[in-house]
Amino acid sequence: MFPFSGVPVTYSRDHIDYPATDVHGCYARVLAPTSGTVVDVQRRDRWDPARDEPGTRGGITVTIHGDDRVRYYFAHLGRVKVAAGQRVEPGTWIGVMGSSGNARVTKCHTHLGLSRICPQDEWEVLRGEIWPWRFLDAWRRGIQRSPTAAKNRAYAADPAACERAAQEG
């Protein structure tokens, strides 16, 4: 389902350097787009602009492993409403759009990254490897379009992405 409510939101069909989407609409509710499990929650904004470490740029974040085997990453939140290990269903309120991490120096937004589920702790694949906007378009229209096939194509194109990202990160 469309993962934003409460205020009108807009989003782009491009992103800097890698496939992801920044959704704009300050203070929108951020909702789980599918059923799954919250696997990671960062409640503290650890980004330091002087060091600009890539793994902390998302600030306050929520990561869901969907039952569809797609990883959903929401970054730059202002507030988190779920806990790691919590089961979510489509429409579960998981957070509030904000300006944490490196969004402190931009207009408030939520970064949405869709990717394969990696077994290692890494940030490069997590931030996004398939374009979310086409799924957002469908979900906004009430069409249940799954990103699973796109995630599978990304895996087939680069099966070692998780391992490489874990080594680099």
Image (cartoon, grey):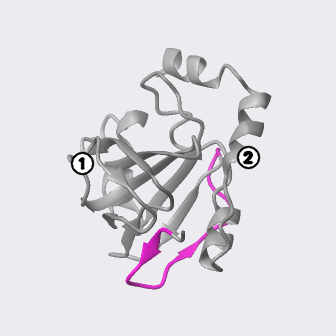
- Relative depth, front residue between 2 and 163: 2
Part of the protein shown in magenta: 3-18
Residue corresponding to mark 1: 83
Regarding residue 78, the answer to whether it shows in the image is yes
Residue 74 is situated, as x and y percent measured from the top left of the image, at: 43, 54
Side (left or right) of 42 relative to 129: left
> Image quadrant for the N terminus?
bottom right
Residue 150's disc is: 2
Residue appearing at x 73%, y 46% in the figure:
150
Q: Quadrant of residue 115?
A: top right
Discs 1, 2 touching: Cβ within 8 Å: no
The disc labelled 2 sits on which kind of residue?
Answer: Ala
Residue appearing at x 39%, y 45% in the figure:
37
Residue 68 belongs to the span the image colors magenta: no
- Crowding near the residue tagged with mark 2, few <14, some 14–19, many ≥20 C-alpha atoms within 10 Å: some
Residue 4 is situated, as x and y percent measured from the top left of the image, at: 45, 73
Residue 17 belongs to the span the image colors magenta: yes
Query: Is residue 1 positioned above or below 34 on the image?
Result: below
Identity of the residue furthest to the left in this view: 44
